[in-house]
Image (tube, rainbow, N blue to C red):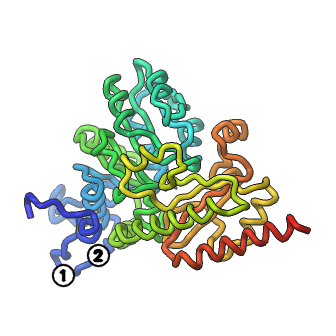
């Protein structure tokens, strides 16, 4: 097996896990323990206290590193605490260049929490390479990217930005939550660190909040491992077990998410009540070429503008039945939401307008249900909007 690289479908099932040495249990046991007996002081089997390490967490970290093609992985109790750990490796006076269309919670963490530590941020439209180049300063240490962005699904050229950042001595971090390692490989494109909200596709079942980072640089990893233990935002053994289970179907889930995403996007694009659909897999996406080059699939996230305003959006979102009106994404069930009121409410209205998060913008996370049922539900919801409009 040494020189044969296992495919991601196989890694998703097998990476990181081995039958339990004690019992032969095929599935990793849930080591629901905070502490570990020592035969004599300081003598132990690698586990002393579960904030530091836990035998259900270790195989999960191994699996994640292998899936992303990284040397190291660390898990945290949420996506945001994973991001916080990365930013915690900076010092007061350091500068970060970040995309201007980030997950709302990431923007809030940067501007309301991490900025208080004396770290400066410049938010730029990172799909424009010149804006990234122009924002870099001598004290720029990190470039933080999301691609596709959320909710505008703009793409950021990871390879080109990595070259720009590296020539200025800055590291590149990519939030790969939307694509998962199945469809996008930031480390292979030159990024230094990948972060995921595992709450989304990696776990995939909307029953856990967790985050992770994957990277190759061993000294940066040691610093992050120190912070994982020193700050203590670690996930519970039960949650690690659930994510290990969720990972096994990651590749097949992503395939179905992407198939449904493409069908729903094409269907919406033809609908008379839809002003515009944003989906990287549509030829009409302004960066469709980059999408084809940078990703091996287009995922299940779709953003569209309804014809009308807040009233029509409310009516549409109240009429869906199969799609659950809820924040979050990446679960097996289809979700739908209104970014301006829900996920992106923490972004000031003026900035929302600038980015394009208008009141008629709706975001869909396509689940793995049958496509006919999904389209029927959307059809019924559009009919509800229309029936009021006609009256
Ligand atoms: C959800 C999400 C986060 C935050 O992760 P949590 O697990 O909710 O803390 C960060 N980035 C993206 C792209 C997300 O979708």
- Identify the image quadrant of residue 6: bottom left
Q: Quadrant of the C terminus?
A: bottom right
Other residues around mark 2 within 10 Å, as few (<14) / some (14–19) / many (≥20):
some
Residue located beneath label 2 in the image: 29
For residue 291, side relative to residue 123 (left or right): left
Other residues around mark 1 within 10 Å, as few (<14) / some (14–19) / many (≥20):
few
Camera-side residue of 238 and 66: 66
Q: Secondary structure at mark 1?
A: loop
- Identify the image quadrant of residue 338: bottom right
Residue occupying the point 49% across, 49% down: 80
Residue located beneath label 1 in the image: 23
- Would you say residue 223 is visible in this rendering? no
Q: Is residue 88 above or below residue 179?
A: above
Farthest residue, direction left:
2
Q: Position of residue 60 (x, y in %)?
A: 30, 63
Q: Position of residue 122 (x, y in %)?
A: 53, 28
Residue occupying the point 23% across, 79% down: 26
Q: Position of residue 297 (x, y in %)?
A: 40, 58
Residue occupying the point 24% across, 57% down: 66
- Would you say residue 115 is visible in this rendering? yes
Q: Secondary structure at mark 2?
A: loop
For residue 210, side relative to residue 5 (left or right): right
Residue occupying the point 43% across, 59% down: 198
Q: Is residue 247 above or below residue 158?
A: below
Cβ atoms under marks 2 and 1 closer than 8 Å: yes
Q: Position of residue 107 (x, y in %)?
A: 56, 41
Camera-side residue of 126 and 329: 126
Name which of mark 2 and mark 1 comes first in the sequence. 1
- Identify the image quadrant of residue 129: top left
């Amino acid at each position: 097996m040494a020189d044969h690289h296992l495919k991601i479908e196989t890694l998703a099932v097998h990476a990181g896990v081995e039958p339990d040495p004690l019992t032969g249990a095929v599935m990793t046991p849930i080591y629901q323990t905070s502490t570990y007996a020592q035969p004599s002081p300081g003598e132990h089997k690698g586990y002393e206290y579960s904030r530091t390490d836990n035998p259900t967490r270790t195989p999960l970290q191994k699996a994640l590193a292998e899936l992303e093609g990284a040397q190291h992985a660390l898990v945290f109790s949420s996506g945001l605490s994973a991001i916080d750990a990365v930013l915690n490796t900076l010092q007061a006076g350091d500068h970060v260049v970040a995309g201007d269309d980030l997950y709302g919670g990431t923007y809030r963490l940067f501007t309301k929490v991490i900025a208080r530590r004396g770290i400066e941020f410049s938010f730029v439209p990172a799909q424009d390479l010149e804006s990234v180049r122009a924002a870099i300063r001598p004290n720029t240490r990190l470039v933080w990217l999301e691609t596709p962005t959320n909710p505008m699904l703009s793409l950021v050229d990871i390879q080109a930005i990595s070259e720009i950042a590296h020539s200025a001595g800055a590291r590149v971090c990519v939030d790969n939550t939307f694509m998962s390692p199945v469809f996008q490989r930031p480390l292979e494109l030159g990024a230094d660190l990948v972060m995921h909200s595992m709450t989304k596709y990696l776990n995939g079942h909307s029953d856990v909040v967790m985050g992770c980072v994957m990277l190759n640089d061993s000294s940066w990893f040691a610093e992050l491992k120190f912070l994982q233990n020193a700050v203590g935002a670690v996930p519970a053994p039960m949650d690690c077990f659930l994510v290990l289970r969720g990972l096994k179907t990651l590749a097949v889930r992503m395939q179905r998410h992407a198939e449904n995403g493409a069908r729903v996007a094409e269907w919406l694009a033809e609908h008379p009540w839809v002003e515009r659909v944003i989906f990287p897999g549509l030829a009409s996406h302004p960066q469709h070429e980059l999408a084809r080059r940078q990703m091996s699939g287009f995922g299940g996230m779709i953003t569209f503008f309804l014809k009308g305003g807040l009233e029509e959006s409310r009516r549409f979102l109240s009429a869906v039945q199969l799609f659950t009106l809820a924040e979050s994404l990446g679960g097996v069930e289809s979700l739908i939401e209104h970014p301006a009121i829900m996920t992106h409410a923490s972004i000031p209205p003026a900035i929302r307008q600038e980015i394009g998060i208008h009141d008629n913008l709706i975001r869909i996370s396509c689940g793995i249900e049958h496509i006919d049922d999904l389209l029927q539900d959307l059809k019924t919801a559009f009919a509800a909007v229309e029936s009021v409009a006609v009256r």
